[in-house]
Image (tube, grey):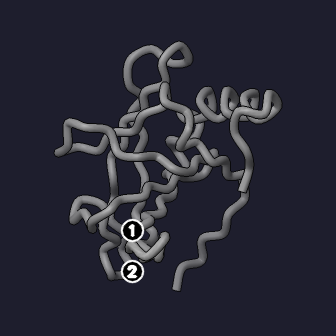
Protein backbone atom coordinates (compact mmCIF):
# COMPACT_ATOMS: atom_id res chain seq x y z
CA UNK A 1 0.00 0.00 0.00
CA UNK A 2 1.42 3.37 -0.99
CA UNK A 3 1.38 6.45 1.19
CA UNK A 4 1.43 8.70 -1.90
CA UNK A 5 -1.35 11.22 -2.13
CA UNK A 6 -2.09 13.61 -4.95
CA UNK A 7 -1.52 17.24 -4.03
CA UNK A 8 -1.57 18.99 -7.41
CA UNK A 9 -4.19 19.53 -10.08
CA UNK A 10 -4.22 16.94 -12.86
CA UNK A 11 -4.85 17.98 -16.43
CA UNK A 12 -6.00 15.94 -19.42
CA UNK A 13 -3.30 16.62 -22.02
CA UNK A 14 -3.84 13.97 -24.70
CA UNK A 15 -5.00 16.62 -27.19
CA UNK A 16 -1.84 18.77 -26.77
CA UNK A 17 0.14 17.50 -29.76
CA UNK A 18 3.15 19.74 -29.01
CA UNK A 19 3.67 18.01 -25.63
CA UNK A 20 5.55 14.71 -25.85
CA UNK A 21 7.11 12.31 -23.36
CA UNK A 22 9.83 9.77 -24.07
CA UNK A 23 11.26 6.97 -21.95
CA UNK A 24 14.70 5.43 -22.41
CA UNK A 25 14.69 2.45 -24.75
CA UNK A 26 11.95 3.71 -27.08
CA UNK A 27 12.36 6.15 -29.97
CA UNK A 28 8.68 7.03 -30.29
CA UNK A 29 6.92 9.19 -27.69
CA UNK A 30 4.47 7.58 -25.30
CA UNK A 31 0.84 8.74 -25.41
CA UNK A 32 0.67 11.15 -22.48
CA UNK A 33 -2.86 11.38 -21.08
CA UNK A 34 -2.57 13.31 -17.83
CA UNK A 35 -0.05 15.64 -16.26
CA UNK A 36 0.39 17.48 -12.99
CA UNK A 37 3.26 19.06 -11.09
CA UNK A 38 3.53 15.77 -9.18
CA UNK A 39 3.29 13.14 -11.90
CA UNK A 40 1.80 11.90 -15.15
CA UNK A 41 -0.26 9.13 -16.71
CA UNK A 42 0.15 7.17 -19.93
CA UNK A 43 -2.35 4.91 -21.78
CA UNK A 44 -1.11 1.94 -23.83
CA UNK A 45 -2.88 -0.75 -25.81
CA UNK A 46 -0.45 -3.42 -24.53
CA UNK A 47 1.59 -3.75 -21.32
CA UNK A 48 5.12 -2.34 -21.50
CA UNK A 49 7.80 -3.94 -19.31
CA UNK A 50 9.76 -0.64 -19.17
CA UNK A 51 6.88 1.02 -17.31
CA UNK A 52 5.73 -1.76 -15.00
CA UNK A 53 5.70 -1.04 -11.27
CA UNK A 54 8.26 -3.17 -9.44
CA UNK A 55 5.80 -5.08 -7.26
CA UNK A 56 8.04 -4.48 -4.23
CA UNK A 57 8.21 -1.71 -1.67
CA UNK A 58 11.06 -0.15 -3.66
CA UNK A 59 9.45 1.62 -6.62
CA UNK A 60 10.91 1.35 -10.12
CA UNK A 61 12.63 4.56 -11.22
CA UNK A 62 11.73 5.83 -14.69
CA UNK A 63 13.63 8.49 -16.64
CA UNK A 64 11.26 10.68 -18.66
CA UNK A 65 12.22 13.18 -21.31
CA UNK A 66 9.58 15.84 -21.92
CA UNK A 67 9.37 17.93 -25.06
CA UNK A 68 7.01 20.88 -25.43
CA UNK A 69 7.44 22.75 -28.68
CA UNK A 70 7.68 26.49 -28.11
CA UNK A 71 7.71 26.19 -24.31
CA UNK A 72 10.97 24.43 -23.42
CA UNK A 73 14.12 24.13 -25.47
CA UNK A 74 15.01 20.54 -26.36
CA UNK A 75 14.08 17.81 -23.91
CA UNK A 76 13.79 18.12 -20.15
CA UNK A 77 14.86 15.00 -18.23
CA UNK A 78 12.73 14.21 -15.18
CA UNK A 79 13.01 11.22 -12.86
CA UNK A 80 9.86 9.50 -11.65
CA UNK A 81 8.56 6.38 -9.97
CA UNK A 82 6.19 3.81 -11.46
CA UNK A 83 3.26 3.71 -9.03
CA UNK A 84 0.67 1.50 -10.69
CA UNK A 85 -0.82 -0.03 -13.82
CA UNK A 86 -4.57 -0.33 -14.21
CA UNK A 87 -6.45 -2.26 -16.85
CA UNK A 88 -9.40 -0.27 -18.15
CA UNK A 89 -12.20 -1.53 -20.38
CA UNK A 90 -12.61 1.14 -23.03
CA UNK A 91 -15.47 0.34 -25.43
CA UNK A 92 -14.79 -3.39 -25.19
CA UNK A 93 -10.99 -3.13 -25.47
CA UNK A 94 -8.55 -3.35 -22.59
CA UNK A 95 -6.14 -0.43 -22.31
CA UNK A 96 -3.39 -0.10 -19.74
CA UNK A 97 -3.08 3.08 -17.71
CA UNK A 98 0.27 3.67 -16.02
CA UNK A 99 0.56 6.20 -13.21
CA UNK A 100 3.84 7.86 -12.24
CA UNK A 101 5.05 10.21 -9.54
CA UNK A 102 7.87 12.66 -10.24
CA UNK A 103 10.76 12.68 -7.78
CA UNK A 104 10.55 15.65 -5.43
CA UNK A 105 13.95 17.01 -6.55
CA UNK A 106 12.84 17.05 -10.22
CA UNK A 107 9.42 18.68 -9.83
CA UNK A 108 10.76 22.19 -10.43
CA UNK A 109 11.86 21.05 -13.90
CA UNK A 110 8.28 20.22 -14.94
CA UNK A 111 6.88 23.55 -13.68
CA UNK A 112 7.31 25.54 -16.96
CA UNK A 113 5.26 22.84 -18.71
CA UNK A 114 2.60 22.82 -15.98
CA UNK A 115 2.43 26.64 -16.09
CA UNK A 116 1.68 26.49 -19.82
CA UNK A 117 -0.92 23.74 -19.31
CA UNK A 118 -2.61 25.89 -16.64
CA UNK A 119 -2.67 28.79 -19.12
CA UNK A 120 -4.20 26.46 -21.72
CA UNK A 121 -6.87 25.48 -19.20
CA UNK A 122 -7.85 29.15 -18.80
CA UNK A 123 -8.23 29.30 -22.60
CA UNK A 124 -10.40 26.16 -22.59
CA UNK A 125 -7.88 24.00 -24.47
CA UNK A 126 -7.33 21.46 -21.65
CA UNK A 127 -9.34 20.52 -18.58
CA UNK A 128 -8.68 19.26 -15.08
CA UNK A 129 -9.79 15.82 -13.96
Q: Which disc is residue 96 wearing?
A: 1
Disc 1 secondary structure class: strand
Which of these two is toward me, 43 or 108?
43
Q: Quadrant of residue 74?
A: top left
Left/right placement of residue 98 relative to residue 29 reads: right
Figure quadrant of the C terminus: bottom right
Cβ atoms under marks 1 and 2 closer than 8 Å: no
Report crowding for label 1: few under 14, some 14 to 19, many 20 or more residues within 10 A (C-alpha): some
In this rendering, the answer to whether 31 lies above or below 94 is: above
Please give the name of the residue rendered at 69% of the width and 39% of the height, measured from the top-left corner.
Answer: 126
Which numbered tag is attached to residue 57? 2
Which residue lies most toward the bottom here? Answer: 1
Q: Which one is in front in this view, the residue at disc 1 or the one at disc 2? A: 1
| Residue 32 x, y percent position in the rendering | 46, 46
- Which of pointers 1 and 2 lies earlier in the amino acid sequence? 2
Residue 25 vs 91, above or below: the answer is: above
Task: Tell me which corner region of the image, top left, top right, bottom left or bottom right, holds residue 82.
Answer: bottom left
Picture coordinates of residue 102, whole percent (x, y): 50, 51
Residue 103 or 26: which is nearer the viewer? 26
Classify 10 Å Cα crowding around label 2: few (below 14), some (14-19), many (20 and above): few
On the image, the x and y values in percent for residue 31 come to 40, 46
Q: CA distance from mark 1 to mark 2?
A: 22 Å
Helix or strand or loop: what does disc 2 sit on?
loop
The residue that appears at 27% across and 65% down in the rendered structure is 46
- In the rendered image, residue 17, in percent from the top left (x then y), is placed at 49, 30
121 vs 50, nearest the viewer: 121
Give the vertical position of 55 relative to 97 (above or below).
Answer: below
Q: Is residue 24 left or right of residue 97?
A: left
Q: What is the residue that sits farthest to the left in this orientation?
A: 25
Q: Residue at x 56, y 38 (%)?
A: 15
Amino acid sequence: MTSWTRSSSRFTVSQVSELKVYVAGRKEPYPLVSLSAGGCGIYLMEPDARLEPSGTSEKRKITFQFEFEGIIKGRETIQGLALYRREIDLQGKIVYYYGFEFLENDRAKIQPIVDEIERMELMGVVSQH
